[in-house]
Each structure stands twice: as structure tokens, then as C-alpha cells.
Amino acid sequence: MLDEIKITEAIINSYLKDFNQYLESDVIICGAGPAGLTAGYYLAKTGAKVVILEKNLRPGGGLTGGGMMFNKIVVDKEGKNILEEFGISYEKYEENYYVACALETLGALVYQTVKKGAKIFNLITVEDLLFHNEKVSGVVINWTAVSLANLHIDPMTLRSKFIVDATGHNCELVRILEKKMGNVLFTPTGKILGEKLMNAEKGEKFTIENTKEVYFNLFVCGMAVNAVFGGPRMGPVFSSMLLSGKKVAEIIKERLG
């Protein structure tokens, strides 16, 4: 026999148990797109305590839209290696062009990342950053529904050793830091340089090369890299998203010791 109150109780108690366990962590990743999920996978794989925050109802970012709602994505031979690690099917189109289903890709990224031990909380928005000893030390969070309804409700905080901005084109965390702290970013001007016009070849290389720390303890990966450091966009080719996530995980793993 099923009791409605027992069902509600089970949901509330299990969720709050998870939430309490992740008030402090090694790494907070903001944005559960392909770069953020890949970063979470590789960090959790090393034993790091990882939280991934997603403001939307579902993870995936722009991944599932593929190219102009054709739910296919393209990767090159380096990206293909990561697809293989996640168990994602693909087919060769031409030399160095491999096509995968965007939906299968998302499903595999989420499943494998969670199975490695990363915790994903969706419907949570980061509205500010925690700041101690001149370093970013966590995030200030609220329910996404609160911001959508424009309600004045005080947020709460999560603390972490490192934070990753994987929020894509909007580079939301870095934008908060720039707005409140001024020209302090590790860019040539100290400010966000802005995403440039599309160039797939240059954009893919730029993303990987510039995946790094943008302020003390705050890192960028994926399309947030191009927005912050002034690189081109590249459209529905996703190798650099996966490789950028892996690279930021490797950098942070070394910092964690």
C-alpha cells in the first residue's frame, strides 16, 4: 500500500540528506552542459567531492539542440576518444568528422558522471559568490523559481576549494565577479573580453588553450572560456567542450594534490 505522505516524506528527507552532505565540497561546477559534466566526471573519478549546479530543469546546456534543432553533434578524433570512454555511439562521416546523437551524448554524460560520484542539483541558480581572503571560496544560491518570479528571498551558500564557471556563452559567475570587483580578472584588460564571431577551427583550439583559472580559485571551461578571454564561437562541434572539461579537471586535480 502506498501512502502519499510517506512518498512526500521520502523525497524531502532524501533530498535534504544529499544537500547537507554537499554544503562543503572540493569543487563546485556551475553549469551542467557538456563541459561541466565532463569536468565533473573526471574530477569525481579521482575521488574529489564534486557538486554540479544547474539552473534549468534539465542538464545539457545547448547540447541537445544539436545544430539548429537537428539533434546531432560533431566531434573530431580527439573528441571521439572521450565519446568512447563514456560509451557513446558515433559514426564516421569523413576523416576527422564523427557524428553522435546529442540526446544519447547527454544521457551518457549525466549517467557516467553521477555514477563516478558527482552530485547534480538542478533548478538552482548562482546569484553571487562567496569571497574570503581575497579568493573565491564558494557560491551564493537560490531556487531558479525565485529569480524567475522576481521574489525578494534571501539566498544560502555552498563552500568549496575551487569553483568552475561552465555556464556557457553568458559566463555568469565571471560576470558577477567583474560587476562587483572591477578589473581583477586574469585577462589582458582585467575584464571580460567577449565572444567573437564564429570560426570553428580557431574557436575549438582557443577553448582548450584558454581553459584555466580566471581569478583566484575560479576557473572557466567550455564556451565560458571564449566569452571571457575573447575567442570565436564554433557552433555544433563539441570536441573542445569535452576536452575543456577534462583539462580543467586535470588542472584542479593537481591543485587539490
Image: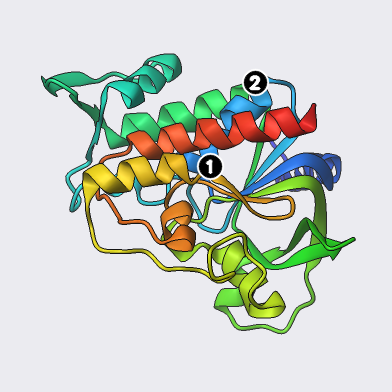
Q: Secondary structure at mark 1?
A: helix
Q: Position of residue 161 (x, y in %)?
A: 80, 44
Which residue occupies 27% across, 46% down? 202
Which residue occupies 55% across, 76% down? 148
Q: Nearer the viewer, residue 18 or 98?
A: 98
In this image, 244 relative to 93: left or right?
right
In this image, 90 relative to 244: left or right?
left
Q: Is residue 154 above or below residue 101?
A: below
Q: Indicate the colouring scheme.
A: rainbow
Type of the residue with mark 1: Gly
Mark 2 packing: few (<14 Cα in 10 Å), some, or many (20+)?
Answer: some
Residue at the far left in the pictured view: 94
Q: Position of residue 137 (x, y in %)?
A: 81, 55
Q: Look at mark 1 in the image and give the residue it sits on.
A: 36
Q: Nearer the viewer, residue 58 or 93?
A: 93
Type of the residue with mark 2: Lys
Residue 10 in view of the camera? no
Spatial distance from mark 1 to mark 2, Cα to Cα? Answer: 14 Å
